[in-house]
């Protein structure tokens, strides 16, 4: 049997899907992914090599006036047509979305063909794309507990935080090899999957002052390295790091944009965080709410972008280092595995319900429309 996954635009919308793909494969499911032609999800999924990838036309529905809203409507309509053809060809039992505007055409196309869909919302608030998709979805699962109250009760689901399992599999010897050779605390700077030019520039402006007290690991974003900086053993910069396990392990404080994925990882790993959310001028305000969750449940402080100075970072870091961590939400390998299994089981339940309807329609007499795979799956879960 097959499952179609979709979601993208940012790494956060595709990351949970990427984590679940090998687990879905272990359940004997064939995985098909529908995403954009040039989004970050294409590289993430194709590099993993475990799912067939189909690219469709996508468009963004903006909350402000823009002529591109008009042209993007046609891109979305084209995407629905393309998704319809792919789903009709692949014949999945269920569709799962990680969010983002690439998912809208896919969820609508699956609904037209009576294929049940499952959505996962990664932010504290429901995004516009998922608000649209929620009308057509069977179930909506959330990352943060209070988000479920924004979902109709009959569709509501919660499976806990899901982060990359490799982040929890770090050997102490590897940490010692990767760590800086001095005894200064280490600050990790993350500007999001595409890198934040604003955060990058602020860090570079006050780098010499910061390096007097801290080591800096700076992940700048693709094509955003600063090659004009003098070489300094206390400063390491990267465009992008695929395996973040060691980077997180040797970092004492994380400066982050407040995408849901970064917040979930920071809280789950028990990291002290300086949160610099996008303002409501640049977003719907979801990053401010994600950051507030970290403040309420982890060990975090919110700094506005315009307030970033060497003095502010140093004072905030000193305050964080003297503040005890909240260990209640730190993920163990066992709890992460449990959260993943809950999500997989929720997907399987939706699949079972679809097959159960087919069985009941057949009135236990004509089972010609039910494949052998579906029947075995149905009887196993029954």
Image: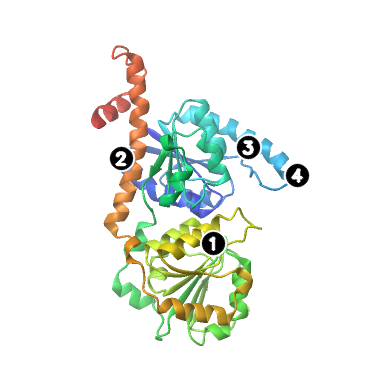
In the rendered structure, which disc, 3 or 4, sits on the residue that comes first in sequence? 4
How many badges with numbers are in the image?
A: 4
x, y percent for residue 341: 31, 46
Relative to residue 358, is residue 56 depicted above or below?
below
Classed neighbour count for the residue bearing mark 2: other residues with Cα under 10 Å, few (<14), some (14–19), many (≥20): few
For the residue labelled by badge 3, is the local secondary structure a helix, a strand or a loop?
Answer: helix
Q: Quadrant of the N terminus?
A: top left
Q: Are the residues flagged by discs 3 and 4 in contact, CB closer than 8 Å?
A: no
Q: Nearer the viewer, residue 267 or 3?
A: 267
- Left or right: where 342 falls relative to 118: left
Task: Give the Cα separation between the discs numbered 4 and 2.
Answer: 45 Å
Task: Give the Cα separation between the discs numbered 1 and 3.
Answer: 26 Å
In the rendered structure, which disc, 1 or 4, sits on the residue that comes first in sequence? 4
Q: Which residue is mark 3?
A: 76
Q: Nearer the viewer, residue 341 or 300?
A: 300
Closer to the eye: label 3 or 2: 3
Residue 192 — which label?
A: 1
Residue extending farthest to the right is 67
For the residue labelled by badge 2, is the local secondary structure a helix, a strand or a loop?
Answer: loop
Q: Which residue is mark 4?
A: 67
x, y percent for residue 37: 58, 45
Residue 27 — which label?
A: 2
Residue 102 seen from this side: no
At 32% from the left edge and 54% from the top edge, which residue is drawn?
336
Q: Quadrant of the C terminus?
A: top left
x, y percent for residue 190: 51, 67
In the rendered structure, which disc, 1 or 3, sits on the residue that comes first in sequence? 3
Closer to the eye: label 3 or 4: 4
């Amino acid at each position: 049997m097959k499952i179609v996954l979709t979601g993208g635009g940012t790494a956060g919308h595709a990351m949970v899907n990427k984590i679940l793909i090998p687990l879905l494969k272990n359940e004997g499911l064939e995985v098909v992914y529908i995403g954009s032609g040039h989004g970050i999800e294409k590289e993430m999924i194709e590099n993993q090599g475990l799912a067939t990838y189909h690219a469709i036309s996508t468009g963004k529905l903006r909350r402000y006036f823009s002529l591109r809203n008009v042209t993007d409507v046609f891109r979305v309509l084209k995407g629905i047509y393309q998704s319809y053809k792919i789903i009709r060809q692949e014949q999945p039992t269920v569709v799962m979305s990680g969010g983002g505007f690439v998912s809208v055409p896919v969820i609508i196309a699956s609904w037209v063909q009576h294929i049940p869909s499952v959505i996962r919302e990664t932010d504290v608030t429901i995004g516009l794309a998922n608000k649209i998709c929620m009308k057509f979805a069977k179930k909506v699962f959330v990352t943060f507990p209070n988000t479920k109250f924004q979902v109709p009760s009959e569709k509501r689901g919660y499976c806990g935080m899901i982060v990359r399992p490799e982040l929890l599999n770090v050997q102490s010897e590897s940490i010692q090899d990767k760590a800086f050779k001095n005894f200064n605390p280490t600050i990790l700077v993350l500007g999001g999957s595409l890198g934040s030019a604003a955060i990058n520039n602020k860090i570079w402006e006050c780098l010499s002052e910061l390096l007097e007290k801290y080591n800096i690991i700076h992940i700048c974003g693709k094509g955003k390295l600063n090659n004009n900086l003098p070489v300094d053993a206390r400063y390491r910069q990267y465009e992008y790091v695929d395996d973040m396990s060691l980077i997180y392990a040797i970092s004492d404080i994380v400066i982050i944009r407040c995408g849901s994925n970064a917040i979930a990882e920071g809280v789950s790993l028990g990291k002290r965080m300086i949160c610099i959310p996008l303002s409501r001028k640049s977003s719907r305000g979801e990053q401010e709410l994600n950051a507030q969750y970290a403040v309420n449940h982890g060990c975090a402080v919110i700094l506005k972008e315009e307030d970033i100075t060497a003095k502010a970072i140093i004072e905030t870091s000193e305050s964080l280092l003297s503040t005890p961590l909240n260990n209640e939400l730190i993920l163990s390998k066992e709890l992460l595995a449990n959260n993943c299994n809950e999500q997989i089981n929720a997907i399987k339940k939706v699949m079972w319900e679809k097959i159960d309807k087919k069985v009941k329609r057949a009135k236990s007499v004509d089972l010609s429309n039910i494949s052998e795979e579906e029947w075995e799956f149905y009887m196993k879960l029954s």
